Image (tube, rainbow, N blue to C red):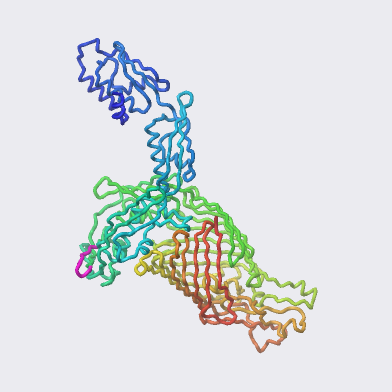
Amino acid sequence: MRLMLLASACLLPTALGVAEARSARQHQTSGATSGNNVIQAISVTGNTRIETSTVLSYMVAQPGDSFNQDDLDRSLKTLYATGLFKDVTLHRDGNTLLVNLVENPIVNRIVFEGNHALKDEDLRKEISLRPRAVFSSQTTAADRQKILNQYAGKARFGATVTPQIIKLSHNRVDVVFKINEAQQTLIHKIVFVGNHAFSEARLAQVISSKENTWYRFFSSSDEYNPERIKYDAELLRRFYLHNGFVDFHMIDATGELSPDHKSFYVTFTIHEGEQYRIGKMDVRSTVRRVTPEMMRKHIELFKHQIYDGTAIQHNTTNMQEWLQAQGHPFAMVRSEIARNPEKRIVDLLFDVTEGPHVYVERIDINGNTITRDNVIRRNLPMAEGDPYTPFDKKYSKLALQDLGYFSTVSVDQTQGSAPDRVNVSANVVEKPTGEFSLGGGYSTDVGVLGNASIKQHNMLGTGIDAGISGTVAYYEKQADISITDPYFLNRNLVAGADFYFIQNNYQTYQSYKESQYGMSLRLGYAYNRYLSQSFSYTLVDRQVGNFYDAATVAADPSYIEWVPSVYVQQSAGWSLLSQLSTSLTYDRRDRRINPHDGYMMKLGGDFAGVGGNAKYFRVKADGAYYLPLDSITGSHDWTMQFKGGVGYMGDWDSNSKRNIIDNFYLGGENLRGFLQGGVGPRSGHICTGAYVSGSCPTLDYLPRQGQEDLLGGRFMYTASAQLNFPMPMGDDLGISGRYFVDAGSLSSVRVQKKYTDYSRRFEAGYPYTPINGDTMIPRVSTGLGISWKSPFGLVNIDGAIPLRKEKGDRLYPLRFGFGQQF
């Protein structure tokens, strides 16, 4: 009978349930006639930790009740169901009920042996057993299965877990889980059945699971995971709909373990159907003041193009967002299709309707242990009392994810106090927002470098970003302290300040060095999701020096040294820059880092002369357009990007100092294949010292071969076209490629005073110094580049050759940098 009772006793009864059982039993047994059948006392033995009163509270049978077999059976069940006892027996001794107990031991500690792929703390989070808790064999068996599930998630399906119980004194036990992790069970082969329009190689590029091969040592894509297989099935469905296969459906997606338990074979069985093209397109509207004619101009598709489910969904979303921005917050747009299998045509209808009028009643914030509630609320696109649409839920999650403060974010809704009210809850899990980094590497611009930084992106949960960083390189030293408040004065204002020190030694391609001590105050405002403007004030103490060794020349008149150009010497010395700047940005890119779609336009200006001795103005305009090539390549990894910019600089005070370090410079990042600053106006060095036959040219101010100083210019324009593409094995190694064509030019000399009059070249005291490279003729380069997300940081390598250059332009065909952070 005890075994039967153990099998059925699976739930721990509540005190209320026991009381109800007692009440029913007393009602049934009231008026019992036999006094010899009444329980006069209950004797409990064997309990050492658990009070007798606690044991009696779990029992249905109580003193004064009759010896009813049903009551005794139910008492036995409730005692077993508590999980506190290993054995329970009930006996009758006269009118006394004897309850003999054997208590379950207490867990002293839990030990894991043999685990390497999973840490102890990760395993402890999954199991239910805890030290100082009551031991239960059922709980131990369940915990064993949980551990096996964790290893299955790591593709170790051959793992074994054996619980061992070590008995200790005072009825305590140690629980040891002996683990044999086994080798990872990787995917050996992926097979597609039913595909005709696309090859297996093409479909293998679509899914995230990959076959095991030697170079995937940094990737987990070859690990078998049932959840990933489901995700791959969805990726295939989207891919086929994107390419016009409206009737596609996934028949089966299975993974089979090989007989030796060492690998998996994954099979996707699909039905492709026929490829469709778009036929008629129209709009139907039932929303007041929204006509079909008004909406037809927002159709971004064209007739006879291949049906593209992704493009249709984007078009639907854009229409709905446009309507909501025009004062129709509850407008909804749905796409309906009508197939014509004979002609393989799909007619498309955009149905514009009025959705349910729902308003936000309450917003709850859950899970934030560091970040303050108001920091989260101010980033949500709605407030209590506002209209609520599905897009609000979508953008709420995106906005909280973009903060970078949380490891997971979810936004849920529940019914409010009325049918047209909803309660919205933002559920977050905090993650560390502090950052300490050390870095090292090499850059073509500054040589061997090392850097260190300490940053806090969410100081005290206020959302304030603060940090200090420093860089030491062979040709550069830099230190920076910055702080930014993204919601200054509890308003839609971004405010910040920077304090910095920079020291550059341009000896590799210039003949001077520069040091700066400065500060910058910043203020920004977002007019809406796409349009923003920023303002800043900069105050910089600057010093320009050169390498002219005047003391050596004075001591030895026959000493010959090539010293900086007279135009560089004009900029030497101290200057103070006091500058106001502003920029207006309209950004419709799909993401800020590695954009794939959209465009961005930026207009900026600088005005120097609010104090200080630099008095100039600069205007700049930049734009970028990103064209996804998904419809052509069938892959999300191909993007065409176009960039362009133009800038002009002028002086509003003819008597002010014109420092060449303020000029525009072209080359390097903005014109690959050319040295940084290597395009544009330049001048020769001066030969000092007494003339020595054969050592110094007859004209003291001719250019030294290959060592002209770069002067920058007033006017600059750039243009670039770049194709970003995936590399073989790129997903697994973190490598992507690019092909680019860059063009641009820099002209219009800006120096303190020109000495270019050839007719005065022999005039005493006139330092005749010609200026070369001052032309608007475009320079053009083309090349290839790769980016590698290595374990040591991002590695960028660009190789470029000039297609068009001018005499004297400084080239730099290979440019690379790595070791940014670790």
In this picture, is 439 found above or below 81? below
Instruction: Pick the quarter of the image with the C terminus.
Output: bottom right
Q: Is residue 306 left or right of residue 446?
A: left
| Residue 561 is inside the magenta segment | no
- Residue 89: give x, y in percent of width and height: 33, 20
| Residue 343 is inside the magenta segment | yes
- Residue 582: give x, y in percent of width and height: 48, 67
In this picture, is 485 found above or below 786? above
In this picture, is 19 found above or below 424? above
- Residue 809: give x, y in percent of width and height: 58, 78
- Count of residue discs: 0
The image quadrant of residue 304 is bottom left
Q: Is residue 726 visible?
A: yes
Magenta: main secondary structure: strand
Q: Is residue 291 visible?
A: no
634 and 361: which is toward the camera = 634
User: Which region shows up in magenta?
Assistant: 335-345
In this picture, is 160 found above or below 605? above
Instruction: Pick the quarter of the image with the N terminus.
Output: top left
- Residue 517: give x, y in percent of width and height: 61, 62
The image quadrant of residue 468 is bottom right
User: Residue most toward the front?
Assistant: 259
332 and 110: which is toward the camera = 110
518 and 339: which is toward the camera = 339
